[in-house]
Image: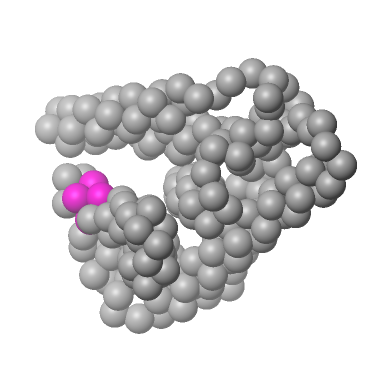
């Protein structure tokens, strides 16, 4: 039975509350992360982030340890019933995304930072809304889309590595593949909510990770466009 079909009184209300709870937690984590990256953009942490992400391979490793490692810790904590471990995992992921975001914002005037974050938030919100509508308005199974997202990430890493050694312009394609990977992963996570595949907290964290992945890549594009407009 689909996660959006109900055949008992009260089930629809309970499911709706669950979706609202997941959306609320996820949105709260995203909002907190955006504020954190803005705050850290005024500190020495932004410089450290810029240094780490100035190298493709070092940047990938940093992302894997912070965001990926944090996600793994959060899931492990939830599975073991340890909310402390889950909290540490979420905090690590928050730091990882904030490290990237602060590095991107560091060389931008304060007024432009807020504008860029606002525009990025709107675009990311629209993408998330379109994906959610597409998933909930169809009975199509997106169960394999998590695998597809990993294919995109793997392809992005391969293309980025080639670009690093051959031609930096090629690395733009890697960024596009990473963005696509996060959109595909977001589709899977929203489908998982529709199907009640995971618990509320696990679902909220999964959506948060995917949404922030989209956000970071959109932020890079927005900052480039604003830079061109100011030139």
**Image position of 81 with respect to 11: above or below:** below
Q: Is residue 74 visible?
A: no
User: Which residue: 28% across, 65% down?
Assistant: 49
Q: Residue furthest right?
A: 9
Q: Residue furthest left?
A: 165
**Image position of 76 with respect to 95: above or below:** above
Left or right of 150? Residue 120 is right
Q: Nearer the viewer, residue 222 or 121?
A: 121
Q: Quadrant of the N terminus?
A: top right
Whole-percent x, y for residue 166 in the image: 15, 28
Q: Is residue 72 magenta?
A: no
**Image position of 51 with respect to 187: above or below:** below
Whole-percent x, y for residue 20 in the image: 72, 54
User: Which residue: 60% across, 61% down?
Assistant: 25
Q: Nearer the viewer, residue 6 or 183?
A: 6
Q: Is residue 42 visible?
A: yes
Whole-percent x, y for residue 131 in the image: 65, 34
Applied colour scheme: one colour
Q: Nearer the viewer, residue 159 or 27?
A: 27
Whole-percent x, y for residue 11 in the image: 79, 43
Secondary structure character of the magenta stretch overall:
helix
Query: What segment carries the magenta color?
Result: 60-64
Q: Residue furthest front?
A: 8
User: Which residue: 40% across, 76% down?
Assistant: 40
**Image position of 69 with respect to 128: above or below:** below
Left or right of 122? Residue 150 is left
User: Which residue: 33% across, 55% down?
Assistant: 76
Left or right of 172? Residue 47 is left
């Amino acid at each position: 039975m689909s996660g959006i079909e109900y055949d008992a009184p009260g089930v629809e209300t309970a499911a709706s509350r669950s979706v609202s709870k997941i959306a609320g937690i996820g949105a709260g984590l995203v909002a907190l992360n955006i504020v954190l990256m803005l705050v850290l953009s005024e500190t020495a942490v932004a410089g450290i982030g810029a240094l780490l992400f100035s190298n493709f391979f070092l940047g990938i490793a940093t992302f894997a340890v912070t965001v990926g490692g944090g996600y793994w810790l959060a899931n492990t904590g939830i599975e073991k019933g340890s909310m402390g471990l889950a909290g540490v995992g979420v905090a690590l992921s928050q730091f990882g995304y904030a490290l990237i975001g602060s590095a991107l914002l560091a060389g931008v005037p304060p007024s432009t930072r807020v504008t860029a974050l606002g525009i990025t938030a709107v675009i990311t919100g629209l993408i998330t809304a379109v994906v959610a509508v597409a998933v909930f308005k169809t009975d199509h199974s997106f169960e394999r889309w998590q695998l597809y997202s990993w294919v995109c990430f793997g392809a992005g890493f391969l293309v980025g590595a080639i670009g690093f050694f051959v031609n930096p312009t090629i690395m733009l394609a890697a960024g596009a593949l990473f963005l696509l990977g996060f959109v595909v992963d977001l589709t899977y996570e929203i489908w998982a909510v529709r199907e009640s595949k995971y618990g509320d907290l696990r679902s909220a964290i999964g959506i948060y990770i995917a949404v922030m992945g989209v956000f970071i890549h959109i932020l890079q594009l927005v900052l480039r466009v604003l830079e061109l407009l100011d030139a």
